[in-house]
Image: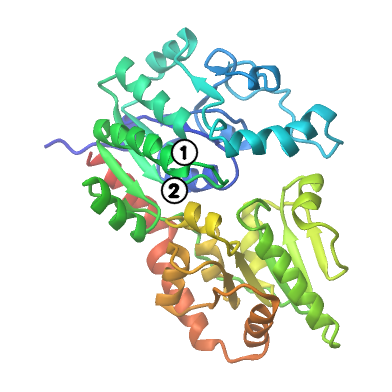
């Protein structure tokens, strides 16, 4: 059998949202792939689109909204390449129509299970011509929702000779919001997933728990690939005032856990000790306010920093914090997920506190490895106990285990090389 070479092998990344953690993870995994052989099509455009040879934004030529969303949402213009006039989200006040949509219309549509089918994707003549031009050998996708699952099936019908690789980042069959008849939604989504898996040639997961569960559930062998991290030593000195650091998005999946830490730090500071909670995020100010409310003086919001600076920030912190909100709906959606920050946190040499529900992959992983303070019961009192151990206890052995685990499971050189070899073997 001929040995394939990545220099002669092109990949089309078909992404629901090529931004934030999804884009970082994907680009880290493909870090040993020539940029000129990487292409991406996505419903979102971000600065990460510049990291591939060519980008196609799925817009008004491919996206059509159903009633009543067609009166509220209007797709942006489909285009190829990164627009020079692309603007990041601003912190300006939202319009009355947007507020009504977010506060009233969207929650109702989610509850009635009309939200995920509010739009459909179809192949336009322009998108079809683009695929014919770039000639991908493989389409790599994490699917992500019902609309994308249907789109992948349509793409496969049009281009049956292009192999498809499915990478499960989370169990999107269980949405992050509540639905009146959730079992009906899951049956519909699962039927589509089974159909997509049936046309695929490769199956990846983000955790061993997902690999085992999906193998048992669907009968396909999934290979686990976590988000790779650069494992580098840092000679940073500790911040002069003790601090806890969180880096990343503030959203539905972690805002409760962040508020709980804010309350714990405030309680500690009321008893003399001075402690800061530092959050580095690109989440817009209005969204931060919606999720976290009024911030106490001990919680400091910092603008995002380049990914290359994150390791030093983590290494100079006294504690790093990995939060997942402890509630039933979050546990359902994140059950098989792995945080994009896990490897960096473990490699930082800084005591880590993980706060999340029992029974999900991240919780079980960290419990089994005994390399962090794991808190699975909600309440600031439990976080205060973990903070006391992280700040004042003997963490030397735990930090040694964390470093070894970071190298074993998240080392970018190893993970990305194995990832490349797995694709070339398909």
Residue 144 vertical placement versus 237 (above, below): above
User: Which mark is drawn over residue 319?
Assistant: none
Point 57% across, 61% down: residue: 327
Q: CA distance from mark 1 to mark 2?
A: 8 Å
Using the image as rendered, state which of residue 67 and residue 79 is in the foreground: 67
Tag 1, which secondary structure? loop
Using the image as rendered, state which of residue 217 and residue 9 is in the foreground: 217
Residue 288 is situated, as x and y percent measured from the top left of the image, at 77, 51
The quadrant holding residue 386 is: bottom right
In this rendering, position of residue 19 left or right of residue 284: left
Point 68% across, 22% down: residue: 73
Residue 174 vertical placement versus 264 (above, below): above
Residue 338 is situated, as x and y percent measured from the top left of the image, at 47, 57
Residue 196 is situated, as x and y percent measured from the top left of the image, at 32, 32
In this rendering, position of residue 341 left or right of residue 421: right
Provide the residue designation for mark 2.
169
Point 81% across, 45% down: residue: 286
Quadrant of image for the C terminus: top left
Residue 281 vertical placement versus 425 (above, below): below
Provide the residue designation for mark 1.
144
Tell me if label 1 and label 2 are in contact, CB under 8 Å.
Answer: yes
């Amino acid at each position: 059998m001929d040995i394939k070479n990545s220099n002669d092998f092109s990949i089309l990344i078909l992404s629901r949202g090529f931004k934030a953690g999804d884009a970082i993870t994907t680009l880290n995994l493909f870090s040993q792939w020539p940029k000129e052989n990487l292409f991406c099509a996505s419903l979102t455009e971000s600065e990460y689109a510049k990291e591939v040879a060519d980008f196609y934004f799925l817009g008004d030529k491919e996206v059509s909204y159903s009633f009543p969303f067609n009166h509220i949402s209007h797709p942006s213009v489909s285009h190829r390449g990164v627009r020079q006039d692309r603007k990041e989200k601003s912190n300006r006040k939202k319009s009355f129509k947007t507020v009504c949509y977010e506060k009233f219309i969207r929650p109702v549509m989610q509850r009635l299970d009309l939200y995920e089918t509010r739009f459909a994707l179809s192949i336009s003549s322009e998108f079809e011509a683009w695929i014919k031009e770039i000639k991908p050998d493989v389409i790599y996708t994490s699917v992500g929702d019902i609309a994308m699952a249907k789109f992948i099936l349509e793409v496969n019908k049009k281009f049956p000779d292009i192999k498809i690789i499915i990478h499960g980042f989370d169990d999107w069959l269980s949405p992050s919001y509540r639905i009146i008849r959730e079992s009906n939604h899951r049956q519909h989504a699962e039927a589509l997933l089974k159909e997509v898996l049936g046309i695929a040639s490769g199956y990846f997961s983000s955790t061993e728990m997902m690999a085992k569960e999906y193998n048992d559930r669907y009968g396909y062998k999934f290979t686990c690939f976590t988000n790779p991290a650069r494992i580098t030593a840092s000679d940073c000195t500790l911040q002069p005032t003790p601090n806890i650091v969180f880096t990343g998005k503030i959203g539905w999946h972690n805002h409760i856990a962040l508020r709980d830490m804010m309350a714990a730090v405030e309680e500690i500071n009321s008893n003399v000790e001075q402690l800061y909670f530092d959050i580095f995020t690109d989440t817009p100010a209005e969204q931060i306010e919606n999720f976290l409310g009024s911030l106490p003086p001990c919680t400091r919001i910092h603008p995002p920093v380049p990914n290359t600076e994150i390791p030093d920030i983590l290494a100079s912190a006294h504690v790093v914090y990995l939060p997942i909100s402890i509630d039933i709906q979050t546990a359902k959606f994140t059950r098989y997920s792995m945080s994009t920050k896990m490897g960096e946190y473990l490699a930082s040499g800084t005591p880590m506190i993980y706060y999340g529900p029992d029974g999900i992959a991240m919780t079980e992983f960290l419990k089994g490895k005994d390399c962090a303070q794991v808190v699975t019961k909600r309440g600031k009192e439990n976080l205060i106990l973990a903070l006391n151990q992280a700040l004042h206890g003997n963490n030397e052995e735990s930090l040694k285990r964390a470093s070894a685990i970071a190298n074993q499971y998240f080392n970018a050189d190893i993970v990305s090389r194995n990832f490349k070899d797995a694709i070339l073997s398909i």
